[in-house]
Image (cartoon, rainbow, N blue to C red):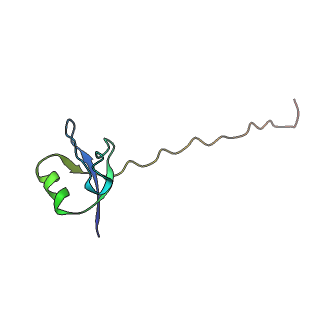
């Protein structure tokens, strides 16, 4: 089945029937495309979105001194 990434519209609650009625998180989540979610989109309760890309972790660079010990 095709999946959609949905976010709830501010101030709206979107229960997810596939997750026991737990609400769709503010940051969004992947859901299986269904008539239920199409109705939520049409009613303005949820919008199709893109998942947030993970922020790159800062790489730690070891301190290097030129010429050995100083």
Residue 67's x, y, as percent? Answer: 86, 37
Residue 56 position, x and y percent, is 52, 45
Q: Residue at x 87, y 29 (%)?
A: 70
Q: Residue at x 32, y 44 (%)?
A: 25
Instruction: List x then y, in percent, for residue 37.
Output: 20, 56
Q: Residue at x 33, y 51 (%)?
A: 29
Which residue is nearer to you in this view: 69 or 57?
57
In this rendering, the answer to whether 6 lies above or below 11 is below
Q: Look at the image and tell me in which quarter the N terminus lies.
A: bottom left
Q: Residue furthest top?
A: 70
Identified at 19% across, 39% down, the residue is: 12
Q: Is residue 24 left or right of residue 56?
A: left
Judging depth in this view, the residue of 43 and 47 nearest the camera is 43
Closest to the observer: 56 or 6?
6
Picture coordinates of residue 9 (x, y %)?
Answer: 21, 42
Marks counted in the figure total: 0
In the visual, does 55 lie left or right of 13? right
Q: Nearer the viewer, residue 27 or 12?
A: 12
């Amino acid at each position: 089945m095709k999946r959609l990434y949905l976010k709830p519209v501010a101030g709206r609650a979107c229960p997810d029937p596939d997750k026991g009625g737990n609400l769709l998180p503010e940051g969004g989540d992947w859901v299986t495309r269904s008539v239920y979610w199409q109705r939520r989109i049409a009613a303005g309760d949820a919008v199709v979105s893109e998942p947030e890309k993970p922020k790159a972790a800062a790489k730690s660079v070891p301190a290097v001194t030129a010429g050995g010990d100083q």
